[in-house]
Image (cartoon, rainbow, N blue to C red):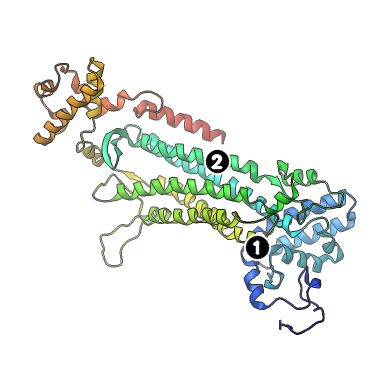
């Protein structure tokens, strides 16, 4: 198409739904700059669903004829088949998914296709499409979070008794079990699912009927359309309905938190797999080698997830920045919401799918975990608690155990290896039963309250998680 920058006559055949207002066509550069069709076409099925519900309402309200509705439904069935078969021809000239589908519909069914847009605008149309698409993505993510939890729960149950160091400041702190450690991530994923479920309620409100910004003078029935599309409610203010992107930001915030949890687990998997730690090994299918060092087995998948978390966090900040200075109502800025939103959903979905699979391929090395427990006086707190239960104030017990730890360091042994008379030199309350609490098994068994790391409590947590997931 050639530009006619000097023409004073209206141009014909531009293909734009709004071209009658302008005296010259849009330049090719501007068309490419403003078009969204090559990324928003992924909402095509949602656009068709929304249009069919709108058309059904228009016919029900006698705004279009029953024949028009039949023609629209027939045309949309063909368009949907073409899209699914990869035979639909997308045109840059038609800007976006909505005009591409409308143009094809008009070609197929004539004037009925031109009547479809009665009582709506692309503003409320795109807002509806995004919500429909995001609702589908949210449902998928909630399901994948459940799959991820199940994979962790299975592994946790296998290792409810496998002792490992619990860390603070990356220093050995107290004994826990590997199963207990994994169940911490189950709790994180459970909260993630709750956040997405809660966000879904606000996603699931219908903006269609707001038209461009002020509503419409046609006798539409928004509640009918909401019911047809499975929306729980309608957006009650037309200005807000077309310009709100809170629901997209909230989705990205929930996604950023979920990715942060995956990133934390990624960091631990990377550390645990290092030969310097050696707690686990990942299945080969989740790792790569080196082009120069033949011995290398690199944990590329968790490293990538750790990196992709920054990308998702960036999308959240980008959407917040996009919206921060927009006056009501719709502005073209909002076209920039889709690519970060789509990429956020894609990234989280892919990460959850691969993590659920990767968890099932983790090989645990209990001996290395047990050896690490000998390196940091992991049962020191148990010795302090033992003295408190014998009647010593906690601060005095803390001081006595600190001196015992120094002695063990001097002797280059662990606390359970100190002779009884040496332990008694730090407190006369120590007797032979002290060794029952200084063992790893004794330390674990003592934490038998809900949320504790005792193997019986880990199994109870596993059972509760399985019951919740069975109801999901």
In the rendering, at what x and y percent does residue 200 appear?
Answer: 62, 43
- Which numbered mark, 1 or 2, is in the foreground of this view? 2
- Disc 1, SS: helix
Q: Would you name the residue on which mark 1 appears?
A: 41
Residue at image location 50% in from the left, 38% down from the top: 191
Sequence-first disc among 1 and 2 = 1
Residue 118 vs residue 190: left or right? Answer: right
- Disc 2, SS: helix
Residue at image location 19% in from the left, 26% down from the top: 399
Mark carried by residue 195: 2
Mark carried by residue 10: none
> Relative to residue 31, is residue 164 depicted above or below?
above
In the rendering, at what x and y percent does residue 39 appear?
Answer: 61, 64
Q: In this orientation, which residue lies closer to the viewer: 91 or 403?
A: 403
In the rendering, at what x and y percent does residue 296 appear?
Answer: 28, 59
Identify the image quadrant of residue 431.
Answer: top left
Local packing at callout 2 (Cα closer than 10 Å; few below 14, some 14-19, many 20+) is some
Location of the N terminus (image quadrant): bottom right
How many marks are shown on the rendered structure? 2
Tag 1–tag 2 contact (CB < 8 Å): no
Q: In this orientation, which residue lies closer to the viewer: 435 or 81?
A: 435
Q: CA distance from mark 1 to mark 2?
A: 28 Å
Residue 289 vs residue 25: left or right? Answer: left
Identify the image quadrant of residue 382.
Answer: top left
Residue 22 vs residue 138: left or right? Answer: right
Residue 424 vs residue 83: left or right? Answer: left
Location of the C terminus (image quadrant): top right
In the rendering, at what x and y percent does residue 14 appear?
Answer: 76, 76
> Relative to residue 202, is residue 37 depicted above or below?
below
Q: In this orientation, which residue lies closer to the viewer: 157 or 136?
A: 136
């Amino acid at each position: 198409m050639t530009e006619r920058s000097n023409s004073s006559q209206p141009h014909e055949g531009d293909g734009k739904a709004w071209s009658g207002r302008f005296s010259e066509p849009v330049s090719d550069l501007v068309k490419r700059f403003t078009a969204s069709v090559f990324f928003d076409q992924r909402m095509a099925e949602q656009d068709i669903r929304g249009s069919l519900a709108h058309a059904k309402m228009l016919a029900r309200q006698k705004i279009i004829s029953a024949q028009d509705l039949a023609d629209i439904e027939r045309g949309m069935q063909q368009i949907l088949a073409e899209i699914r078969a990869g035979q639909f021809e997308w045109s840059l000239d038609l800007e976006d998914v909505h005009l591409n589908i409308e143009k094809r519909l008009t070609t197929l069914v004539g004037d009925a296709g031109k009547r479809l847009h009665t009582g709506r605008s692309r503003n409320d149309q795109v807002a509806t499409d995004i919500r429909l698409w995001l609702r589908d993505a949210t449902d998928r993510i909630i399901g994948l979070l459940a799959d991820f939890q199940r994979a962790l729960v299975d592994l946790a149950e296998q290792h409810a008794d496998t002792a490992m160091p619990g860390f603070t400041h990356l220093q050995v702190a107290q004994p826990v079990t590997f199963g207990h450690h994994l169940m911490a991530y189950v709790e994180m994923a459970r909260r993630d699912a709750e956040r997405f479920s809660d966000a879904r309620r606000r996603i699931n409100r219908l903006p269609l009927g707001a038209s461009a910004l002020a509503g419409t003078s046609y006798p539409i029935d928004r509640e009918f359309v909401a019911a047809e599309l499975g929306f729980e409610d309608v957006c009650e203010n037309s200005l807000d309905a077309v310009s709100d992107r809170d629901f997209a930001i909230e989705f990205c915030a929930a996604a950023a938190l979920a990715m942060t949890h995956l990133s934390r687990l990624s960091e631990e998997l990377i550390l645990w797999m290092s030969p310097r730690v050696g707690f686990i090994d990942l299945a080969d299918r989740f790792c790569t080698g080196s082009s120069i060092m033949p011995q290398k087995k690199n944990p590329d998948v968790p490293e990538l997830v750790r990196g992709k978390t920054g990308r998702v966090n960036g999308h959240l900040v980008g959407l917040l920045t996009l919206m921060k200075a927009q006056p009501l109502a719709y502005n073209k800025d909002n076209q920039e919401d889709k690519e970060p939103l789509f990429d956020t959903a894609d990234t989280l979905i892919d990460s959850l799918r691969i993590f659920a699979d990767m968890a099932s391929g983790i090989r645990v090395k209990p001996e290395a975990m047990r050896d690490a427990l000998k390196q940091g006086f992991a049962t020191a707190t148990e010795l302090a608690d033992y003295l408190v239960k014998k009647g010593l104030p906690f601060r005095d017990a803390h001081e006595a155990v600190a001196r015992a730890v120094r002695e063990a360091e001097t002797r280059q042994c662990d606390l359970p290896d100190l002779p009884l008379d040496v332990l008694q030199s730090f407190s006369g309350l120590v007797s032979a039963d002290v060794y029952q609490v200084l063992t790893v098994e004794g330390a674990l068994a003592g934490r038998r309250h809900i949320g504790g790391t005792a193997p019986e409590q880990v199994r109870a947590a596993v059972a509760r998680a399985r019951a919740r997931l069975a109801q999901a």
